[in-house]
Image (spheres, rainbow, N blue to C red):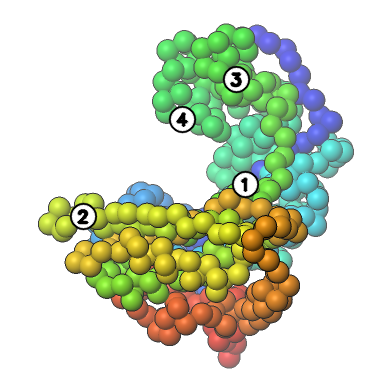
Amino acid sequence: MSSTKSNHTQLFALVDCNNFFVSCERVFNPTLIGRPVIVLSNNDGCIIARSNEVKKMGIPMAAPFHDYRHVISSKNIEVYSSNYQLYGNMSDRVMDSLRVFSPDVEVYSIDEAFIRFNSLAKKDYYDYFQKIRENVLQWTGIPVSIGLGPTKTLAKIANSLAKKDKKNSVFDLSSFAKQIEVLEDTQVEDIWGISGRWGAKLRMIGIGNALQLRNASPKKVRKYLGVVMERTVYELRGLSCLNLQQVGPRKNIMISRTFGNPVDNFTDLEQAVALYTIRACEKMRLQKSRAQAIYVFVRTNTFREDHAQHKDGIVYGFNNPCSDTGFIIKAMEQALGNIYQAGYLYHRAGIILMDFVPDNVHQADLFEEASYEKSDSRMKAIDNINNRFGPGTLFYAAAGLRKDGDWQSRTHHLSPRYTTKWDELPHVI
């Protein structure tokens, strides 16, 4: 057995929000606390979040909503449509709360973040992270679980154990003895980044649990399974190979949705894709980028064999990098007109803003003068108003004046957007 000891000069913590979507709903509706709650995916299709009460009933994750309607009704389970504006804003609040305790925060997903600490006395670990849990709960209303370890992989394993401890929700895996005990009880498929397929390959060479993988020869593992698995071996030994990753600007942004009902006319299709374009442009400007091209695509429902099928996409390039929503909508409309064909029931459409460049880089064009001053001022004014008074306060008519078009995603159980819409603020009586 290898006797490699952990290096305690740094400590990683994985902070995971408990049943995040459900917890967001409970923040503004405390009557849901202790009651069974589920949250549905786009178009109210599948169950994507479950409270602990629902999990105990045996309703699986990603189950089709229609298959469990009777059970949901008979068990008085509260049902909510996905409220992504609320969840995204609450996630930002949680992440900002974590940055109070450390500047080294990697947002791993909407409900998870890694934090790195370089100097903590071991005796203070538990109490300090309990304080973090209490403050995040007080400031945001969101309960979290925290796993601690000298590497990100060990912190991930520790977090899975912390979530099982409903009372304390903090698990410290920084000590060598505790690591050996826990890794022996952890199956390889439960290690971060190891799928069932990779787990099967490991078992073929006699490695079935995390302790066996930890003690395996790194060179042998690399020979048969590659450098990524070799890093996992070292991570399990407490030697950090995966540092925090600071999220940089994306090179492309895609917005795509499945329609609530099939779209059979160009006007509705154009309005839907215009709305997606507006959202993509907002995201692009937020990361201070400009696009050099746009890709527009449409699809029918391939699962409907009784319907005629059509799918197509087209790239429209810009002479100069652009972040002006109005200009990009005009390009989208021209591109969409080239691929639309009447007589089909369109099931999905979307756009991709492509080939980003920083908005402070201005490449001169020999044949066309590009001035961004007026466009940038206009976009900044629109973004500021929508940020202050809520999304859609100012909008483009190309996206349609009605907000209840048949193409809109089905959200029959949508809660108010408490934190991003003035007219949906919670009422206190």
Task: Please name whichever residue, 329 or 42, is drawn nearer the observer in this view of the structure.
Answer: 329
Secondary structure beneath dot 3 equals helix
Q: Evaluate whether residue 403 shows in this view.
A: yes
For marks 1 and 4, the one nearer the N-term is: 1
Is mark 2 in CB contact (under 8 Å) with mark 4? Answer: no
Q: Amino acid at mark 4?
A: Ser
Nearer to us: label 3 or label 4: 3
SS at mark 2 in the image: loop
Q: Which residue bears the numbered disc 3?
A: 227
Residue 34 sits above or below residue 389 on the image: above
Mark-to-mark CA distance, 3 and 1: 22 Å
Which secondary structure, mark 1? strand
Q: Which residue is mark 1?
A: 108
Point out the tag, 3 or 4, that comes first from the N-terminus.
4
Residue 349 percent across, percent down from the top left: 37, 61
- Quadrant containing the N terminus is top right
Instruction: Please name the amino acid that badge 2 sits on.
Output: Gln
Q: Are marks 3 and 1 in contact (CB under 8 Å)?
A: no
Q: Spatial distance from mark 1 to mark 2, Cα to Cα?
A: 38 Å
Q: CA distance from mark 2 to mark 3?
A: 43 Å
Mark carried by residue 309: 2
Kind of residue at badge 3 = Val
Looking at numbered disc 1 in the image, what kind of residue is underneath it?
Tyr
Camera-near label (2 vs 3) is: 2
In depth, the one of 222 and 325 nearer the eye is 325
Q: Nearer the viewer, mark 3 or mark 1?
A: 3
Q: Which residue is mark 4?
A: 195
Q: Calculate the distance from the C-alpha at mark 1 to the C-alpha at mark 4.
A: 18 Å
Q: Is residue 3 left or right of residue 202?
A: right
Q: Quadrant of residue 72?
A: bottom left
